[in-house]
Image (cartoon, helix red, strand yellow):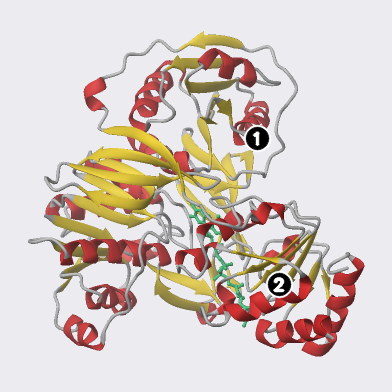
């Protein structure tokens, strides 16, 4: 069995940040593995550990900078990795979910996995659309917002729990091959061991561009474009309490007592 | 052309987001001079249709199917309906079920998709607003296509309640049962446990800012000092530091205590969905730009490890 895990290196903005044009200034960004993908990697790797003949391949769309993050997935136990990049992607103000799904589908067609795991969403742009769009591109079945995954012994059906709103979950049987978008909390992601980190340095990480994948520039055509980026205007009426911790704590205690806390 | 809104229901009732969806749909349809169509798939479908017969809706399309939600069925019905009425914009609520369905619909119809939008403007094409980086940045996106799929953020539009004069039409489509490759086998509840955070008058709610499980004792000490109950944001539950019934938010509990004290919580939209109706919201967070301050009544921008012990001391005096 082969499991393909899509991972994304996401940007987090610092507390104080600056926007320049259509981007957050590079100096205000910290790059890290998308939280949801971390759970997807764990789900794949722990399945591979407890079953025979399971290969875990990770794929990421991103510039060279991402390789450190991709190696982290290898260090946690994935077998090999593919990074897709093309300079023409940098010219896009925004890589749409449709375009990401097209690229990932090209990789998946080459790899022919039984199962694809993605995160529910990426913490930076938060579209929450790529995984299910990918499934449809591939003609795979799928389930989104999965918080429990049980892959049947004959690899033809998986039983999943899908998280709905308000603490309700739905139980669904899904025919394989399928794409599952993984929700946080489904497992306990491991930390990479020192041994894993050393091993990851020698593991295969193939880099592919659009031509390698049989895609052309027209596959990047997107009808959605970023027009502006700004800090949201706050309509907040918050009253900030100022001063040293002792002063703010004293003031807050007064506020809380007025509100009737601990009468 | 038209605007098509896809209604959502659960347990035999139309969900509130569907009434918000009709507001967004009506505004967009008016801007574009197009009729507003609504589609609802499920059972009892006549009951759903009458609940959705609201101000601004021209036609409610119904498809009777004795099933809560199956994305394969939804796809087949809507693709055939779209063939018939050629909507410009297909609107859905940004919910768990839409996450499971809207992107596939967009790909199958070869349309762009933009999710979780908080405003829609008609200019030369559509211009939508959505947030990034956990609500710290706002973006506008231009959609240069006559046809698109858009999911809207819950609670951003007011619900429509005024009755309408819509025509109700059963969708005449055939379902290819062989193309249905998923089966819903049941429903369950994620959260079980002892405390009921929805009953508490005062909640001390802790987020990822607490940094480690050991540090939780600080929050319990504060709750003790205030006679309050401890709640949490999702990462605390994901880490198994507290049981699931402590989780506040979209996928946890909706609470509205007299006082909600958010400690080290950024205020992500899925969290805010569960606590925004609290009478008074206090936030302690070291990031002055944290979105939690947008809805807080009182804020302290500081390190929680410096402030919280001081508050405990005040009350323990
Ligand atoms: C489908 C779906 C459903 C979801 N459902 C829920 C839900 O029900 N409930 C929920 O909570 N989330 C939910 N989420 C997750 C949500 O998107 C956020 O990831 C989550 O709410 C973030 O939790 P947080 O604020 O504790 O953590 P973070 O966003 O990481 O914020 C931590 C905050 O702590 C502050 N901080 C750090 N250190 C300190 C310090 N020393 N002193 C003071 N402040 C400090 C930081 O400035 C930051 O603002 C859901 C997500 C999805 C996709």
Residue for badge 1: B20
In the current view of this chain or complex, which residue is farthest to the right? A258
Task: From the viewer's side, name the closer residue of B77 and B230.
Answer: B230
- Judging from the image, mark 2 belongs to the subunit labelled B
**Which of pointers 1 and 2 indicates the residue nearer the eye?**
2
Q: Are marks 1 and 2 in contact (CB under 8 Å)?
A: no
Q: Does any atom of ligand 1 lie closer than 8 Å to the CB of label 1?
A: no
Mark 1 surroundings: few (<14), some (14-19) or many (≥20) residues within 10 A: many
* Ligand 1 within 8 Å of the CB at mark 2: no
> Residue A59: x, y in percent?
24, 63
Image spot of residue B133 (x, y percent): 54, 65
Residue at image location 73% in from the left, 26% down from the top: B161
Ligand 1 sits in quadrant: bottom right
Q: Residue at x 27, y 44 (%)?
A: A159
Q: Earlier in the sequence, mark 1 or mark 2?
A: 1
Tell me the element at label 2: helix
> Where is residue A174 shown, x and y percent of the image?
26, 39
User: Position of B307 compared to A62: left or right?
Assistant: right
Which residue occupies the extreme front position in the image? B194
Mark 2 highlights which residue? B223
B82 relative position to B23: left or right: left
């Amino acid at each position: 069995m082969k499991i393909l895990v899509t991972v994304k290196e996401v940007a987090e903005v610092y507390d104080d940040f600056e926007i320049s044009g259509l981007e957050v200034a590079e100096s205000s960004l910290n790059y890290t593995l998308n939280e949801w993908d971390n759970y997807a990697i764990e789900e794949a790797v722990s399945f591979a550990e407890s079953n025979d003949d399971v290969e875990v391949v990770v794929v990421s769309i991103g510039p060279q900078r991402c390789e450190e993050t991709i190696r982290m997935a290898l260090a946690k136990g994935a077998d090999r990795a593919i990074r897709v990049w093309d300079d023409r992607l940098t010219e896009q103000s925004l890589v749409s979910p449709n375009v990401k799904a097209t690229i990932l589908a090209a990789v998946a067609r080459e790899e022919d996995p039984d199962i694809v795991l993605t995160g529910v969403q990426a913490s930076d742009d938060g579209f929450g659309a790529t995984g299910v769009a990918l499934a449809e591109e591939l003609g795979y079945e799928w389930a989104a917002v999965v918080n429990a995954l049980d892959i049947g012994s004959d690899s033809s059906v998986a039983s999943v729990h899908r998280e709905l709103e308000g603490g309700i979950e739905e139980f669904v049987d899904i025919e394989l091959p399928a794409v599952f978008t993984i929700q946080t909390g489904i497992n306990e992601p491991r930390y990479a061991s020192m041994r894993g980190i050393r091993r990851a340095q020698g593991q295969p990480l193939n880099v592919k561009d659009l031509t390698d994948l049989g895609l052309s520039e027209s596959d990047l055509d997107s009808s959605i474009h970023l027009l502006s980026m700004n800090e949201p205007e706050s309509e907040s009426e918050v009253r900030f309490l100022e001063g040293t911790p002792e002063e703010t704590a004293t003031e807050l205690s007064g506020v809380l007592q007025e509100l009737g806390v601990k009468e | 052309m038209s605007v098509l809104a896809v209604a959502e229901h659960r347990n035999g009732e139309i969900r509130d987001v569907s009434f918000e969806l009709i507001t967004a749909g009506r505004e967009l349809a008016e801007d574009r001079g197009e009729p507003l169509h609504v589609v609802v798939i499920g059972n009892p479908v006549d009951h759903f249709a009458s609940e959705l017969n609201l101000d601004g809706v021209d036609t409610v399309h119904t498809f009777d199917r004795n099933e809560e939600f199956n994305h394969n069925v939804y796809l087949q019905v809507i693709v055939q309906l779209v063939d018939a009425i050629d909507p410009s914009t297909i609107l859905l609520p940004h919910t768990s079920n839409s996450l499971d369905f809207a992107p596939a619909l967009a790909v199958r119809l070869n349309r762009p998709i933009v999710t979780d939008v908080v405003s829609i403007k008609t200019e030369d094409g559509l211009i939508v607003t959505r947030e990034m980086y956990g609500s710290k940045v706002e973006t506008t996106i231009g959609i240069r296509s006559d046809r698109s799929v858009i999911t809207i953020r819950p609670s951003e539009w007011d619900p429509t309640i005024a009755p309408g004069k819509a025509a109700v039409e059963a969708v005449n489509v055939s379902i290819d049962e062989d193309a249905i490759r998923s089966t819903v086998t049941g429903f369950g509840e994620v959260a079980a446990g002892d405390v009921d955070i929805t009953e508490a008058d005062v909640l001390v709610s802790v987020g990822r800012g607490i940094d480690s499980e050991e540090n939780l004792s600080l929050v319990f000490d504060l709750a003790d000092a205030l006679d309050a109950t401890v709640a949490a944001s999702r990462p605390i539950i994901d880490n198994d530091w507290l049981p699931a019934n402590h989780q506040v938010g979209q996928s946890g509990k909706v609470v509205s205590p007299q006082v909600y004290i958010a400690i080290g919580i950024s205020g992500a939209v899925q969290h805010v969905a569960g606590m925004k109706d609290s009478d008074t919201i206090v936030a302690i967070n070291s990031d002055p730009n944290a979105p939690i301050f947008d809805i807080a009544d009182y804020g302290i921008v500081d390190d929680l490890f410096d402030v919280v012990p001081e508050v405990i001391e005040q009350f323990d005096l």
